[in-house]
Amino acid sequence: MKKKIVFLICVFFLTTSAMAATCKGGAIITANNGTTFCKSDNKMNWWSAFTWCESQGRTLAELSKMCPGVSQAAANEEGDCPNLQGTDDGQWKYAWSSLDSNTNGYGAIIVDLSSGAIVISNRNNYGFAFCE
């Protein structure tokens, strides 16, 4: 009986681990409120970032999760997103959100991880995939 229980526990943990979201080819970023995200190591356009997050078993982060309590208005001012301000690692500092900027499908919201500014950017520009 003990062997069956141990076997079932091992199968459960192996299955759970295989199903869990990963961050391969990226790094875990911890926001100032303790929420964690997966940030890609490479810069990419918005569509590639969306696909990259899916390949990790994740989704492109919603602005409301990246910057809790902040409206979707992109003021492009330092400190717009205090939750992510200062979480850059000295590399390129922009991280894509899943939010469309209502510019006929060409724009999306990107967050400056250094200054915390929220910016509207063309989806063909480059930023890091930022997944939840």
Image (cartoon, helix red, strand yellow):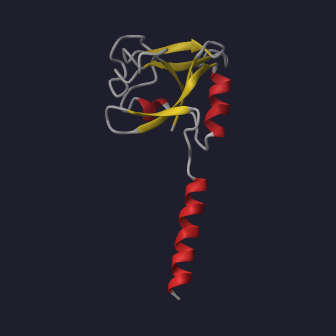
Toward the bottom, the furthest residue is: 1
Residue appearing at x 43%, y 31% in the figure? 66
- Residue 73: x and y in percent read 45, 18
In the image, 87 versus 121, the foreground residue is: 87
Mark yes or no: residue 55 visible.
yes
- Residue 2: x and y in percent read 50, 85
Mark yes or no: residue 61 visible.
no
In the image, 75 versus 86, the foreground residue is: 86
Residue appearing at x 42%, y 38% in the figure? 36
- Residue 49: x and y in percent read 62, 27
**Is residue 33 found left or right of 89 in the rendered image?**
left
Q: Is residue 92 above or below residue 99?
A: above
Q: How many marks?
A: 0
Residue appearing at x 54%, y 82% in the figure? 3
Q: Is residue 40 above or below residue 17?
A: above
- Residue 106: x and y in percent read 66, 15
Kindly indicate the quadrant of the structure image that contains residue 117.
top left
